[in-house]
Image: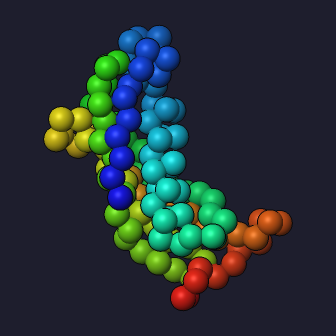
Amino acid sequence: MENHRLVLPEHMNQYGYLFGGYLLAWVDEMAWMAASCDFPGCQLVTVGMREVSFKKSVRKGTVLRFEAIQTRIGHTSVSYSVSVFRTGEEIFSTEVTLVRVDAKGKKLPLPGA
């Protein structure tokens, strides 16, 4: 799955660069969207990100491209490699793992698992 995001002035930190928390939220959202498309009707929540390491800074007005690729399916969880690009250059990547839960937060098997 692929998506894009425009970096706006409200996304900047006190030094004029993209605040890392926004990027992490967008990465989390991207993984959730990919998982929701792969497992429609399932309630999925993030349980972890493998590594957080920002490779390049980002200024306002930048268009970022997000790419999510499914990397692993377990009994109750699924993982996605999420990469972020700026004009073709990868600036961030991590693996996000989501788990299927019921309304009370109890883990449920993924369909087909």
Residue at (45% x, 61% y) in the render: 34
Q: Is residue 94 visible?
A: yes
Residue closer to the observer: 4 or 22: 4
Q: Is residue 97 above or below residue 85?
A: below
Residue closer to the observer: 33 or 56: 33
Q: Which residue is farthest left?
A: 88
Q: Position of residue 10 (x, y in %)?
A: 49, 17
Give the quadrant of the N terminus: bottom left
Q: Quadrant of residue 91?
A: top left
Q: Position of residue 111 (x, y in %)?
A: 58, 83
Q: Position of residue 12 (x, y in %)?
A: 44, 18
Residue at (51% x, 32% y) in the render: 21
Q: Is residue 92 above or below residue 74?
A: above
Residue at (52% x, 40% y) in the render: 25
Residue closer to the observer: 46 or 41: 41
Q: Is residue 41 above or below residue 24?
A: below
Q: Position of residue 5 (x, y in %)?
A: 38, 35
Residue at (30% x, 42% y) in the render: 65
Q: Is residue 57 visible?
A: no
Give the quadrant of the C terminus: bottom right
